[in-house]
Amino acid sequence: MNGFEKLWNDIGTSGVMVLSTCAENRVTSRSMSVVVIDGKFYCQTNRDYLKCRQIDQNPNVALCFGRFTIEGVCKNMGRPHDNEFFIEALGRAYPDALKRWSDLPQECVLEITPSLIQSWIYEDGVPYIESWDMQSGSYKKEKQ
C-alpha cells in the first residue's frame, strides 16, 4: 500500500470533523458530519449560516479530526438531492442527518477539495509530521 492509499484508508469514509472558516479577520469552527468520496470531503448545512457566508468571501477552509489536519478549498454544490452521490454516502454514514436535514429548502452541500493533509505520528517515541501535498502528489515525513 503506497502512502496515499494508506492515507485514505486511515481517513476512512466518514467522520465528525471540525470545519474552520474565515472572513473579515474572524475565524470560526464547528463540528460537522463529513463523508469522504473520491478524495474530497462533503457535508451539508444551511446556506444562510455564518460558515457559508464566510466561504462565499473566502473559500479556503480547514478540517481537523483525529491526528489529521486538512487544508483545502470549499465550494457550494447546491441542494443535497441534486447530488445523488452525496445522498447515498450520507445515508450510509448518517441516516438520521439525511432524514432530518436533507429535504429542508435552505440546505446545501459543501465540497472541500484538499490541497494539504498533515498528520502527527510517533515512531519509537520520536514525533514526525507526515505531509501529503495533494496538488503535486508528493509525500514527506519530517522529524520534529
Image: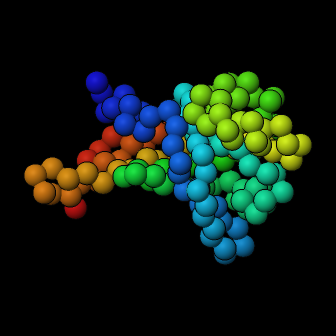
Is residue 67 among the parts visible in the rendering? Answer: yes
In the picture, measured across the screen, residue 73 lies left or right of residue 98, that is left
Which residue is at the far right?
105
Which quarter shows the N terminus? top left
Is any part of residue 137 visible from this angle?
no
Residue 138 screen position, x and y as percent = 37, 38
Image quadrant assignment for residue 86: top right
Question: Which sits in the foreground, 110 or 13?
Answer: 13
Q: Residue 70, image x and y in percent?
A: 48, 50
**Residue lying at 42% horizontally and 43% vertically, measured from the top left:** 133
Q: Residue at x 48, y 54 (%)?
A: 64
| Above or below: residue 3 compared with residue 101 | above
Placement of 10 over or under 60, stated as above or below: above
| Percent coordinates x, y for residue 49 in the rendering | 78, 59
For residue 5, side relative to residue 13 (left or right): left
Q: Which one is in front, 72 or 91? A: 91
Horizontal relation, residue 50 to residue 121: left or right: right
Tell me which residue sits at (66%, 25%) in the image.
88
